[in-house]
Amino acid sequence: MVDKSIVAKLKEKAKQLRIQSVKLVYQAGSGHPGGSLSAADIISAVFYHAMHYNSKKPDWPDRDRFILSKGHCTPLLYSVLADVGYFPKEELATYRRLGRLTGHPNPKLPGVEIATGSLGQGLSVGHGMALAGRLDKKEYYVYVLLGDGELNEGQVWEAAMSAAHYKSDHLIAIVDNNKVAQDNMTATLKGVEPVDKKFEAFGWQVFRIDGHDIGKIIDTLAAAKNAKGKPIAIVADTIKGKGVSFMENKPEWHGKAPNEELYKKAIEELERG
Amino acid sequence: MAATRDGYSTALIKLGASNPNVVVLDAGVSDSTRTNKFAERYPERFFNMGISEGDMICTAAGLAKCGKTAFATSFIAFLLGRGMDQIFVSVAYSDSNVKIIGTHAGVAIGEDGPTAQSIGDVAYMRAVPNFTVICPADAVEAEKAILEISKIKGPAYVRLGRGNVKTIYDDSYGFKIGKASVIMEGKDAAIIASGIMVQESMAAAESLKKEGINVRVVNMSTIKPIDKDAIIAAAKTGTIITAEDHNIRGGLGSAVAEVIAEEKLNTKFHMVGVKDRFAESDSQKVLFKKYGLDAEAIAAAVKSNLNK
C-alpha cells in the first residue's frame, strides 16, 4: 500500500501536467489534448515515481527507457520532460514551431528515445531496447505507452508475439485505454476489447486497472517488476479528455486546439480540480 | 562466380569476431539471406524476428539506440515493401545505427515471380533522407561494402542479389562509399551500371569491342550519394547508357539523369532496365532476354545511341 503523501504529490503533479498540456495546445494553435489529458496520471506515476533516470544524463546507459508510442501526445510528454529538467522550461514556448519540440517526438530532444507518431512502432522499438538490456546484462526496464486505437495497427501484435517469444520480462507496455480514437469511438471504429485478454493470449502478464487511480498505478508498476519470463501489459482504463468536462469522451477533442473562451474554461476547471 | 549474399555472410562473421556490438536480425529467411552463418557462431547476438518485417526493423532500431550496430535483413520485396514507414521513422528520422540489408534483388530472382521481384527499392530509398544506398556488383565488393558501412554511425541500405555473379574484384580493391569504379576503359560510349547488370555490361562491352566500339564500363555501386564526377567523366564519351535490374523510373537511371540535367552535360542518354512493368516467372536468363536486361540489350542500346 502506497504512502498517502506520495499519492497526493503525484496527483498534484498530474494536475499541473494537464494544465501545461492544454496550455501548449492553445499556444501552438494545434495539437492533441484529449489523449494527453487521459494519460496524465499514468505519466505522473511513471516519471515522478517508478522510473529510474537522470535528466542531466540522458545517455546514462543504465537508465530506464520510456517510449511514447502514441506519439501525438507530445503536450503531455514535453510538459513532464521540461518539469523534470531534460530541457529548459522556456523552450516550451517553441512547441510546434521551429526547433526541437516537433509536433510528434524526435530524439534530438533529450528525454526522447526514438521518433514516434506513426502509430504502432514504439512497442517493437522498446522490445529492441529490452533485448539490448538483457544482452548487456543490465537491469533497466523499458516502458512503452500505447493508445487503444493504436492497437488496430498490426505491428503492435507482431511486437507482442516477439516479446513473449523472447520472454522479455523487462518490457512494460501501458495501454492508455481511453476508448476514443480520432474519427470515432474505438469500439465503433475497430473494436479492440477485451484488451487484457488479447495480451494474455499473446503470452503476456497482464494487469487491468483504473488509469486515474494513482495509488493503484504505482502498486501495479511495482508488481510488474515481479513478473518473470513474460513481458508485462498494464491496461489502464481512462477517460479521453479527463479533467475538462467538454472534452471528456469526445473524438473531436483528439486533435484540436480550443479557442480562447474554451481554453479559459478548461484551465479554470483543471485549476479547480 | 559467387553470390553477393555470401559476401554479406563473410563480412558478418568477420564483424562478429571484431566488433562485440554488432547484432544481426532476420525475418524468417536466414537460410536464404545467409545470416544463419552468423547465428551459428554468435547465437546470443542473432535475433530472428519471424515473418514480421516492420517489427524486425523497429527492434533493430531499439537495439541500435542502446549502442548496437544492427543489421536488419530479409528479401528486399518484403523488407522494404512492408518496412518503409519503419525505415522512415524509427531508422532514418531517428538517426538509428541500423543497416538495412536486402537480398534477392530484381527480376533476376527468376521463378518465384513478380511478387518477390523487387524493382522499386532503389527508388524508395533514394527518397529517404539520411540514408546511404549501395548496390555491390560482386561478392568481394559486397563484403567490403558491409565492412565499410559498419564503420559509419548511421543508416545505410545495401541491395544484394540471389544468384552467383562474376567475380570482378580481388582483395586489393579499395571500396569507398560514394566512389564509382571504372572497370573497363573506352571513349566511344559509357555504360553506368549497378549490381548484376555490371557483369552484363562487361559482356556487352566485350562484344562491342569486336565491332570496333570501345565502351567504358562504370560500376556505380553507391547510388546515394552518387559519384557526380564519374558521371561528368562518362559524359565526355558523348553517350551514357545506364543499366539496372530495377524499374527505369526512379532508380540508378533516374539518379544519373538528374546529374546530366543539373550539370547541363552534353551527352546522349538511354536507360536499360525494367520498363515500368511486371515481369513473370522463368529463369534469370529467359527473363533478362524477354525484358531487355541482358548484354545484347545493353549493346543494342549503345549502338543506337552513339554520338559520332
Image: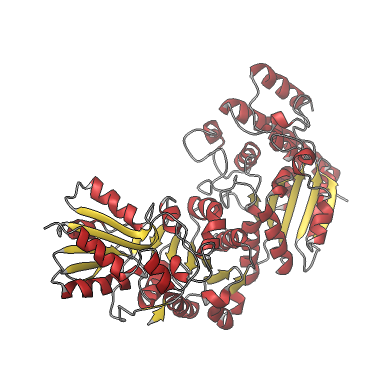
Q: Position of residue B253 (x, y in %)?
A: 32, 56
Vertical arrangement, residue A167 with respect to residue A126, above or below:
below
Which image quadrant: the C terminus of chain A? top right
Q: Height in image: B5 above or below A259?
A: below
Nearer to us in this view, A106 or B257? B257
Tell which residue pokes out farthest to the left in this image.
Answer: B308
Please name whichever residue, A75 or A218, is drawn nearer the observer in this view of the structure. A75
As drawn, the residue found furthest toward the top would be: A261
Colour scheme shown:
secondary structure
- Relative placement, left or right, of A271 versus A66 is right
Q: Residue A6: image x %, image y %?
A: 80, 44
Residue occupying image coordinates x 69% and y 36%: A182
Q: Would you say A214 lies left or right of B307 here?
A: right
Q: Is residue A136 visible?
A: no
The percent position of residue B258, horizontal first and vertical second, equals 29, 49
Can residue A153 be seen in this snapshot? yes
Which residue is at 74% across, 32% downward? Answer: A241
Indicate the quadrant where residue B31 lies: bottom right
Taking depth in this image into account, of A30 and A90 the one nearest to the observer is A30
